[in-house]
Image (cartoon, rainbow, N blue to C red):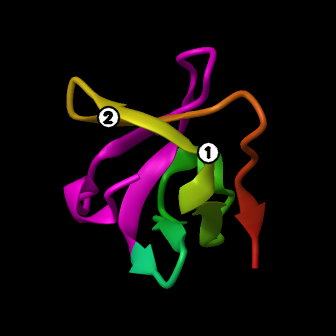
């Protein structure tokens, strides 16, 4: 996965196509999701870069094992 293709404000979707969050930025080997997204519950959540299946149609698509975690 080439993390340079992931941009701020990109939508992040699960393997089922459902909304997971919005990219706030990259921190090390994780994608930081915005905390003001309705799916975030007011907290930053993170997804590992190794959980990204592909970038498609301007969205970050996660693999079936991915879960966003609060940290």
Furthest toward the top, the residue is: 16
Inspect the magenta stretch and tell me whether residue 9 lies in it.
Answer: yes
Secondary structure, mark 2, is strand
Q: CA distance from mark 1 to mark 2?
A: 16 Å
* Residue drawn at (50%, 70%) of the image: 32
The percent coordinates of residue 54 (x first, y second) are 40, 34
* Residue 43 rendering spot, x and y as whole percentages: 65, 71
Q: Residues within 10 Å of mark 1 (few under 14, many from 20)?
A: some
> Image height check: is 13 above or below 49?
above
Q: 29 or 39: which is nearer to us?
A: 29
* Residue 30 % position (x, y): 55, 71
Instruction: Report the residue at 28% width, 47% height from top.
Output: 10
Q: Which mark is residue 18?
A: none
Quarter where residue 56 is shown: top left
Vertical placement of residue 36 versus 19, above or below = below
- Residue annotated with mark 1: 39
Residue 59: mark in rendering: 2
Placement of 36 over or under 10, stated as above or below: below
Q: Is residue 3 magenta?
A: yes
| Left or right of 20 on screen, residue 71 | right
Local packing at callout 2 (Cα closer than 10 Å; few below 14, some 14-19, many 20+) is some
**Residue that lies at the very extreme toward the bottom in this rendered image:** 28
Q: Nearer the viewer, residue 6 or 41?
A: 6
Tell me the quadrant of the picture where the C terminus can be found. Answer: bottom right
**Mark 1 / mark 2, whichever is N-terminal:** 1
Write the start and end of the magenta stretch as one range.
Answer: 1-25
């Amino acid at each position: 996965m080439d993390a340079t293709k992931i941009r701020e404000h990109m939508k992040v979707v699960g393997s089922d196509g459902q909304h997971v969050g919005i990219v706030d930025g990259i921190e090390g080997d994780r994608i930081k999701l915005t905390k003001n997204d309705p799916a975030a519950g007011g907290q930053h959540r993170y997804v590992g870069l190794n959980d990204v299946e592909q970038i498609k149609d301007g969205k970050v698509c996660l693999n079936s094992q991915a879960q966003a975690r609060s940290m």
